Amino acid sequence: MSLAAINEIKPATEPQRAKLSAWLPLLLLPAAPFLASLVLSQGWFFPQCLLRKFTGIPCPTCGSTRSLAAWVQLDLEQALLFNPLFFLVCLALMIWFTARGVELLSHRKFLPNLRLAFRGWPLWKIGGVVLLLNWLYLCATLPK
C-alpha cells in the first residue's frame, strides 16, 4: 500500500464506531463457552480457586467454568446444578443480547424501558441475598 493510499484512509466516524461497539459483544460472546469447553476437554491448566484450595470453602463462582461447558453441550440441568447463579446470569445475558440484537435490527428501543421498570428496586440488596443463597448452595452441594 502506498503512502498516498494510506493518507486517503479516513478514520471511522462516531456513528460507525457506535455500530461496531453495539455489535462487537454480540459477535464475541459466543466464543466464551467454546473456549471454556476447550480448556476443560484438553486438560489445560486452569487456575484453582484459592479460597477453596486453602480453606475448603467454595467461592461464589465455583463451578462456573463447568457450568459454561455444560451450556456448550446444551446440558442445562448440569449447568444449573454446577452453579445456579451463573446459570441465571448466562440466561439473563442471552435474553439481553437477544433484545439488543432485536433493537439493532428493528431500530426500536426496548432496554431503556426495562431500566425504568426496575427503577426504585433495591437491586443491591436483592443481589446480595441471591449471592448468599447461591454460596450456601455451593457449600452444601459441591464435592469437597
Image (tube, rainbow, N blue to C red):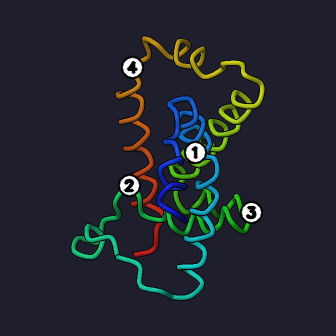
Label 1 residue SS: helix
Label 4 residue SS: loop
Q: Nearer the viewer, residue 117 or 128?
A: 117
Residue at image x 41%, y 58%? 61
| Residue 122 shown left or right of residue 25 in the figure | left
Three-letter residue code for mark 4: Pro
Q: Which mark is residue 122?
A: 4
Against 41, residue 85 (above or below) is: above
State which quarter of the image contains the C terminus.
bottom left
Three-letter residue code for mark 2: Pro
Q: In the rendered image, which quarter is residue 93 located in?
A: top right
Residue 122 in picture, x, y percent from top left: 39, 20
Q: Nearer the viewer, residue 32 or 129?
A: 32
Mark 2 vs 4, N-terminal side: 2
**Residue most toward the left?**
54
Tags 2 and 4 in contact by the CB under 8 Å rule? no
